[in-house]
Amino acid sequence: MFDPASLEQDHRLKESWRKDFEKIKQKFTRKGEYGAETYCGIPLKPLYTPEDIAQIPYSEIGLPGQFPFTRGNYPMGYQFMPWANQPVIGCGTPEETRARMDYLREQGMTGYFGKAFYNLVYDLATHGGFDPTDRAAEGRIGECGMSVYSVQTMAIIFKDLPLDETNIVHITMNQTLPIFAIYLAYAESRGYSPDQLRGNSMNWYHTLDVVSGLATFPPKICDRLAAELIWYCSKNMPQWNTTNLFGYGIEEAGANAYEEIAVIVSAGMSLTRRCMEFGLHPDDFLPRFGFQIGQGNDFFEEIAKIRALRKIWAKINHTVFDAKKPQSMHVRIHTHTSGAMLTAQQPLVNLIRTTIQALGAALSGVQAMEIPGYDEALAIPSEESARLALRIQQVIAEETNITKVTDPLGGSYYVESLTVELEKKAMELIDKIEEKGGFIEAWETGYVRSIIEASARKWKEAVDSGRRVVIGVNKYKMQEERKIPVYKINPETARIQKERDLEYKRTRDAKRHDRAMKELEECLVRFKNEHNDHSLIPTMVEAARCDATSGEIMAAMKKTLGWIDSAALGPC
């Protein structure tokens, strides 16, 4: 990277600087007290110079749009098109959610190429696999998202939207396939064929347990369910992005930066192998994988994390899986600024946190961004906080001029050095997971969760002791904090949705519905016995055509495929 004469000069200048630095340090610190490290424990030097990146081959940094894509997937960065705005939307009833969708669209929320883009999160009842009339849904209807579980409710939320021009992102967990099938049945009722639809299924089967500890399907079943969605879309839906590797959830659960990389890449490797067993070539499906990555408070570490992730994913897919297409090696990132870093104390301070995190995301070259509202530690974002979160993205994109140069941090002594350190640590952990038999086996034994929980404990201990500062929580606390208005779920939401669910089920053709559900149960038995006839999704779609709900489809899946408490997945 640098000629010997320049490195020698750098060394001499650094030694001179070090002497001056040591004199000043002695005045401000006690012996052995000074020291700094990143959030994940990488020791930091007080200064970085060419000497710190001299051993990095230029090919490891390279240019934007060139392998290993350290500096971004595309040559132009944001110079011709900024990142997509992807606020998470979900507010109680379908009608309330649609109103929020329309409001944010009016406020300038845009997706790729200016097209409408809706990032929709389902409520706790739907996430758990329950319809509003299910007793287990009590207290969860409309909580933390929208109550949408049938063709009828989808008809309310998507009324008049051009589904062939609108990107719809379905944020679900265990409900991925039932919601996907219901959406296909709804789209068909409006005259759309699967190949016309645009959007994204999160396909989070691999990460629900390790990030939440909730009950789930057995790991090997999860692996196959995720691959089944990919197979179907590879054959039928060329415009649908199949999988979102959920690194954000890994980090929010407590993992540090390199652990987030390692766990999510390992999950992606497992899924890739399963898809190949289904007869797909990596270039058939990898181009439609995406990543949801967290953007935390350690500004430069989070930027370097994304650069390291791009390098690792590109190298593994090229060397391990023989991918040829550049798109198969791209890490297409939807970043979500950290929800775990938001505080209920002094909530307006969260605007500062999310702005800094969003700036880091932009400087790292992500493809899409979601910024939580400043009040999300308290409730679903209010209309005001959702608008301000959108404005953060708009100000960064349109007022700072940072979009005019592709990867402005490329070549930074500090950033490139930190990128290499994170890549090294992440690869060491990936190798450990591979030694344990791969992601599924490491999940089954509890190893993956043990990594995340150990880091979560370290974080809590650091905050409790004051070694990790959280403004408003353990420093600069206030006796009386300003009260802010928060979004309140309509108290009628549960009643409205229960009555809607009851009426939907009362008026449907019972015989037709029962016949479709029986066929689904038979299909699930074949799937469990590994008869890979790939009939699962078409059979689910037929059940949705016959007015089956997501809760009913999930109940059949739980009964046939198995449903286990996460505590059964090994010690943590």
Image (tube, grey):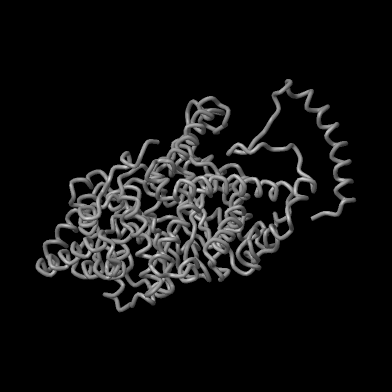
Tell me what residue is drawn at x 18 percent, y 50 percent. 134
Along the horizontal axis of the image, is 344 left or right of 191? right
**Can residue 457 be spotted in the picture?**
yes
Occupied quadrant, residue 401: bottom right
Single out the residue that lies furthest toward the left. Answer: 511
Query: Observer-nearest residue: 543 or 273?
Result: 273
Report the front residue among 513 and 277.
277
Q: Which quadrant is the C terminus positioned in?
A: top left
Residue 502: give x, y in percent of width and height: 15, 57
Quadrant for the N terminus in the image: bottom right
In this view, the residue in front, 488 or 427, is 427
Question: In the rendered image, which quarter is residue 118 located in?
Answer: bottom left
Up the image or down, 47 lies above or below 469; here it is below
Q: Position of residue 108 (x, y in %)?
A: 50, 63
Q: Is residue 282 left or right of residue 404?
A: left
The relative height of residue 154 versus residue 443 in the rendered view (above or below) is: below
On the image, the x and y values in percent for residue 516 come to: 17, 68
The location of residue 455, given as percent across then percent down, is 50, 36
Residue located 25% across and 60% down the image? 529
Can residue 162 be seen in the rendering of this structure?
A: no
Looking at the image, which residue is at 33% across and 59% down? 176
Instruction: Please state the total of marks drawn on the protein image.
Output: 0
Outermost residue toward the top in this view: 30
Side of 225 relative to 282 (left or right): left
